[in-house]
Image: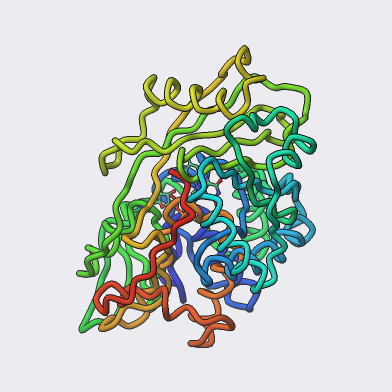
Amino acid sequence: MKRSAEVVIVGGGISGLTIAYHLAKMGHTDVVVVERRYLGYGATGRCGGGIRQQWSTEENIVLARESVRMWERLEEELGYPIYYRQGGYLVTATTEEEVRDIKRNIKLQNSLGVPSRWMEADEIKEEWPWINTDFVIGGSFCPTDGKVMPPRVVWAYARKLREMGVRIYDFTEVRGVKVEEGKIRGVITDKGEIETGILVNAAGAWSREIARMVGVELPNTPYRHEIAVTEPLKYFLEPMVINFRYGIYFTQTWPRTEIVGGIGNPEEKPGYNMRASPGFLNMYTKVLIRFMPCLRHVKIERQWAGLYDVTPDARPILGDVDGYDRFIQAHGYSGHGLMISPMVGKLIAELIVDGKTSLPIDSLNLRRFEEGKVIREANVVG
Ligand SMILES: Cc1cc2nc3c(=O)[nH]c(=O)nc-3n(C[C@H](O)[C@H](O)[C@H](O)COP(=O)(O)OP(=O)(O)OC[C@H]3O[C@@H](n4cnc5c(N)ncnc54)[C@H](O)[C@@H]3O)c2cc1C
């Protein structure tokens, strides 16, 4: 194990891996990624793979838009198949209130260059006859939204990072952080110490634990989110279909062709429980069949759970921490960290190397919670 590195990144999920990749691209390969289990063990390896630009806040729309431009080139850049497809997202409305919110969001999204558009129920029916338009009264569709296969993205980055000379230590746990007068000096792992002056906290739902090792309190809360896949079916469902009111999302995976999806449980208590539950299947399939009655007799093959790392405004926490030198935060994605990871990785690498970023991220700094400058992202599933 290396005993010192320019940058140590805690967390071998999508956040840590993309930051490491952009550092390496900028010529900084003296970087170590430390992962307590296997790469993708956290939310990244358990997620739905959806990539959406249809958000309600400007920062999320711009981060997602820029990320989509990068997703479009990523497979070629990393030289490994990640099964990225741009089949769109259909954000459905089942009430007049949802219609109003979605139409307002379309205006904002269009003003920022995202090509979402309103579709009436009959147009939805014509395009996707399987969707139950008895209660879906319309929706917004963005054709450049899409999906990807998350484990493949992890493998693609890991492979490329190793080629570029970045060290990845899996099954290595960070147990402490050495700090002197607000300056990061190193991390203590179960396999020994690594000296560093720059520490990136990309530990997902466990970021709060890492921050506490430094003496920083984060407002993040972990919540279990469950997900399931059906048996494979002939490929017919290209877009990701979602509804914020029911908290449901579903699509068909490519190339495995299962229907993958999940639903938020409003009764879920905060915590680190990652066990799958029968109650989820009941709740999810009832709503799924309401949206897609044709799936009534399809068999569920697997279900699992992961953690959302939720912030009070459902927006990520990115950047430095006041009073601490070079303790960089990259977490709190609140259920949408995969989709924005390409741009977030680039911005955090820029912050580390240049001390400034090509897009402003100040409004996503941890200090917003103290300053009360909190704008809530409304378009969250679950
Ligand atoms: C069911 C589900 C569906 C989702 N669907 C989508 C979707 O469709 N689209 C989307 O964009 N997002 C989705 N998300 C959210 C997305 O998965 C996350 O936002 C994203 O993966 C977070 O990545 P991360 O790297 O921040 O965290 P993680 O992937 O959780 O990685 C953090 C890593 O840190 C490691 N770690 C923790 N503590 C330590 C320590 N002390 N030492 C060393 N390592 C440590 C953990 O083991 C973990 O591997 C979904 C999430 C879930 C749970």
Colouring method of the image: rainbow
Instruction: Answer with left or right where residue 9 lies relative to residue 142.
Output: left
Name the one closer to the observer, 377 or 71: 377
Instruction: Answer with left or right where residue 110 lies relative to residue 337.
Output: right
Residue 321: where, in percent of width, then height?
A: 32, 77
Q: Quadrant of the N terminus?
A: bottom left
Residue 171 visible to the viewer: yes
**In the figure, 85 relative to 227: above or below?**
below
Q: How many marks?
A: 0
Residue 94: where, in percent of width, then height?
A: 54, 40
Instruction: Answer with left or right where residue 167 lies relative to residue 176.
Output: right
Name the one closer to the observer, 367 or 18: 367
Residue 192: where, in percent of width, then height?
A: 33, 58
Name the one closer to the observer, 186 or 74: 74
Instruction: Answer with left or right where residue 105 lies relative to residue 75.
Output: left
Q: Residue furthest top?
A: 297
Name the one closer to the observer, 112 or 149: 112
**Residue 333 lies in what quarter of the image?**
bottom left
Q: Quadrant of the C terminus?
A: top left
At 71% across and 30% down in the image, what residue appears?
Answer: 256
At 39% across and 64% down in the image, what residue appears?
Answer: 376
Residue 52: where, in percent of width, then height?
A: 61, 54
At 44% across and 57% down in the image, what residue appears?
Answer: 378
**In the figure, 373 relative to 19: above or below?**
below
**In the figure, 80 relative to 367: above or below?**
above
Residue 10 visible to the viewer: no
